[in-house]
Image: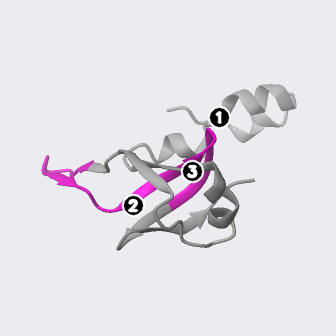
Amino acid sequence: DKATDIRDLVEMSDEEIENLVIPMDITLEMLGIAVLDNNRFTAFINGNPSGTGYRITQETDFVTDSGDKYEGCGVYRVYSGGSFLGTGYINGRDLIPAKVIYR
């Protein structure tokens, strides 16, 4: 319902187009949130596990089409310093990068 016709896009300014773009992390709002310590930022975006240098601030909480609740799937949106870095999952005590999206 928020889509824009391609014919309208070609007539828009860069600023108008930028105002239409939905940030990627918003599209993943069903995932929990892991916040990295600032000193783990570079390691994460280079694909390295974070060790214990993170904290979970929101658990993942899915609701299926039938209304069943599935909690704690272990995949999180990962942030550091207020920036969205991508997704990661917990393996033991480590937060492992799944998809790094930081630009």
Q: Between residue 62 and residue 13, name the one nearer to us.
A: 62
Give the residues in magenta: 62-87
Please state which of residues 44 and 72 is positioned toward the viewer in this rendering: 44
- 38, 33: nearer the viewer: 38
Q: Amino acid at mark 3?
A: Asp
Vertical relation: 74 (above or below) 30 = below
**Residue 17 vs residue 32: left or right?**
right
Which residue lies under the disc numbered 2? 75
First in sequence: mark 3 vs mark 1: 1
Q: Quick one: label 3 or label 2, which is nearer the N terminus?
A: 3
Q: Amino acid at mark 1?
A: Thr
Toward the viewer: 7 or 98?
98
The answer to whether residue 47 is magenta is no
**For the residue carrying disc 3, how many other residues have a C-alpha within 10 Å: few (<14), some (14-19), or many (20+)?**
some
Q: Are marks 2 and 1 in contact (CB under 8 Å)?
A: no
Distance between mark 3 and mark 1 Cα atoms: 38 Å
Q: Is residue 28 above or below residue 19?
A: below
Mark 1, residue position: 4
Tell me if I can see residue 23 in this picture: yes
